[in-house]
Amino acid sequence: MTRDGIRFLFLNLGHFLDHFFVLIFASVAALRLSGEWDMSYAQLIPYATPGFVAFGICAIPAGWLADRWSREGMLSIFFVGVGTCAMLSAMAETPLQIGVGLTLIGVFAAIYHPVGLAMVVHNREKTGLPVAVNGVFGNLGVASAALCTGFLIDHYGWRSAFAVPGAIAVAIGLAYVVFTYRTPRLRVDAGHAAAPAPLAATGRRTLLRVFVVIFLTTALGGLIFQSTTFALPKIFDERLGTLAGTATLVGWYAFWVFASAAFAQLLVGYLIDRFSLRTVFAGIALLQAIFLGVMLNSHGAAALIVAIAFMLMVFGQIPINDVLVGRVTRSGWRARAYALRSLVTFSVMASAVPMIAWLHAGWGFNALFAVLTAAALCIFVAVLALPAGAAFIQRTQSSAA
């Protein structure tokens, strides 16, 4: 394997672990801690909120440091830091202590998206498929969090769900440090470098409209993504009935839904490298709204099938905004641009956690799916506002700096 191939593998493993760690608590809270600590699901999950706030806010300094100092160095800190904090979380004895541990996980997990995505698109002409492959690994991390956490809970207790992945992340981080020590650093162009061709030919008003759409759809997409991925283990626990009788079974169902849906990104990445991004985006947003609406009253096997359908659309949307940001930003500013996008995404995602608790306590998951259906329809309307004639909307011209 070439050096670039090994680097890409580390980036993919980082994306896997990033999403894995931020969702461990979702399964732990839903399937074990609420019983052990005599707290309801609605009472327990708000302790995850500070971690998601940190996940969003800390992306800004992480992106700035990566552009100004070293992207490789920041990625090394991510691996070792998130793994160490996960192992510390395994020692928690109270909700407050685990809340502190989750916050620290969020601080280090915030590093990946602005840094890793900037490295994925670095010096690539066609970015759709590489971003999609990287996205598949991230979503497999989402899937594996439910599966591995359920298995570890059933066999070794909830603490192992934090400790074992934490040790693995630290080991990967040390391997990455050795790799970067022996490999030339990526060259990041200065901030005054020329803009990509599509950006240079774009009017200011058109560009402003594109950024408004990016951040609006990012916010609403983050709300849908966080709500569905965080709540799905509990949704299955309630709606699959006899199909899911143990934590491991719930984890298996969640894993297959997330894993199946993750590969939608490969198709989307292929399509947006060859066809109008606006058309692909609009189609996914509309199908997402339809399937979320169908989920309102689905139970049993039907709930499992519909969950696969809407998660295909939720995951399929993910690479589109990442590709669009990569097309309209120059290399020297790209980590900071992804950091701003991450701030929007994960700040909204943080608000999704208390929203889930509030809606579930008052009206159940039907209310949650009604809200998410409305959000998906808003994404569809926003995408229609994208300028159809812009070169970077139609197809990739050159996203390399």
Image (tube, rainbow, N blue to C red):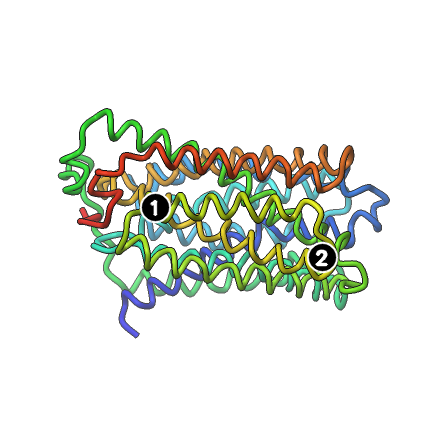
Please say if 66 is above or below 359: below
The quadrant of the picture occupied by the N terminus is: bottom left
Closer to the N terminus: mark 1 or mark 2? 2
Percent coordinates x, y for residue 64 in the rendering: 34, 36
- Please indicate whether residue 45 sits to the left or right of residue 283 in the image: right
* Residue 159 disc label: 2
Outermost residue, bottom direction? 1
Outermost residue, right direction? 38
Q: In which quarter of the image is residue 293?
A: top right
Please say if 84 is above or below 377: below
- Please indicate whether residue 374 sits to the left or right of residue 245 in the image: left
Q: Residue at x 49, y 48 (%)?
A: 287
Percent coordinates x, y for residue 333 in the rendering: 26, 38
Indicate the amino acid at tag 2.
Arg
337 or 224, which is in the foreground?
A: 224
Mark 1 residue element: helix
263 or 299, which is in the foreground?
A: 299
- Residue that label 1 marks: 279
Percent coordinates x, y for residue 268 in the rendering: 38, 56
Q: Is residue 11 visible?
A: no
Mark 2 residue element: helix
Percent coordinates x, y for residue 371 in the rendering: 61, 35
Q: Residue at x 56, y 56 (%)?
A: 309
